[in-house]
Amino acid sequence: MAKAHDVAYVIYQVNDLDLMQTFMHDFGLATALKTDDMLYMRAAGPIPYCHVTLRGTENKFIGAGILVNSREDLDELAALPGSSAVEAIEAPGGGWRVRMSTPDGVRIDAVWGQEPAERLTRRQPNPFNSAFVKQRANASLRPVREPGLVERLGHFVLRVSDHDASVAWFKSRFGMLPTDLMCVPGNPDQVIGTFLRMDRGQELVDHHSMLVVQAQDLGVHHCSFEMLDLDAVMGAHDYLERKGYRLDVGVGRHLLGSQIFDYWRDPFGFRVEHYTDGDSVNADYVPQKFSGFADETTQWGMDPNKEFFH
Ligand SMILES: [Fe+2]
């Protein structure tokens, strides 16, 4: 079975690439390439781009790219019904992809062979002085209210018409593992949301690279970018607020995955998240069930409303 290594990119279509580019710069991404019809934004890490925008009249989510481990994985996926052939990618970093569609028609590209980009760096993570462990000696912190620099795309969330069918689709094509399960409030037997992570054996990975959740409005719920540390999240929060952007929910700490989160809306209404300090798990993690409402998923900070995921 093909194995996914990480998420690569999310793809949107909007009617104004300049507006998207300005927001993304303020949100902490850098331009990898901009043409008349395409915008490729990158994070600090080595993946050449992680947020793609096509120019088009309708503003909509198109899909996502997921990195797989080998050319053989691409060949295997290309042989499945409905898949494209293995295609060369005409974008920064090149590489090859296979285009597929989820049961709801969301485009998912399996990607392999991209040339890594040179890292962008602004600063090192700030050492934290907890009550028991002092990591900072004879030194002060001077965080800045600035766009910050997104480290990487961490995950994206899909709202789907048939939860079980979509989860099976991602598991069978990418070997993803279920981390935690969201159930109907009061009915732990009915799973309506599954957090999926990459299977890298004993290596620690993010609590989730995806969440698949049953919903009536289909498509993307949000995409989420990892920040260097808490100062980066808070500095970016103040900066985005000062620039007049629309706060969605944040700052707070999630229950499932434990991330410190901060959700914003881009100029087209799409929800985008900054996060830091999420859980790391490996293949030994035993899935937990959560049976409650969305407004019970924040441990401290701003609560989302009950219908947050729907
Ligand atoms: Fe998230």
Image (cartoon, grey):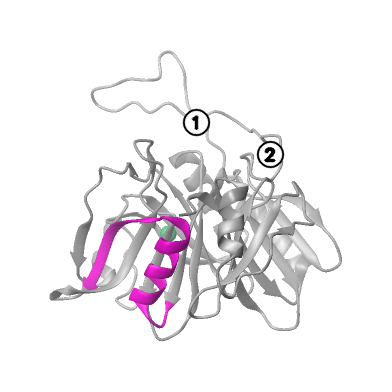
Q: Is residue 244 visible?
A: no
Q: Residue at x 61, y 70 (%)?
A: 83
- Which structural element holds mark 1? loop
Q: Amino acid at mark 1?
A: Pro
Residue 134 marker: none
Looking at the image, the residue that sits furthest to the right is 36
Residue tagged by mark 1? 125
Q: How would you rate the neighbour count of disc 2 (Cα within 10 Å): few for under 14, some for 14-19, many for 20 or more? A: some
CA distance separating discs 2 and 1? 22 Å
Q: Residue at x 50, y 80 (%)?
A: 104
| Sooner in the amino-acid sequence: mark 2 or mark 1 | 2
Residue 116 marker: 2
- Which structural element holds mark 2? loop
Q: Is residue 32 visible?
A: yes
Task: Give the residues in magenta.
Answer: 160-183
Where's the C terminus, which quadrant? Answer: bottom left
Q: Nearer the viewer, residue 308 or 179?
A: 179
Q: Residue at x 39, y 64 (%)?
A: 211
Is 245 placed above or below 307 here? above
286 sits to left or right of 139: left
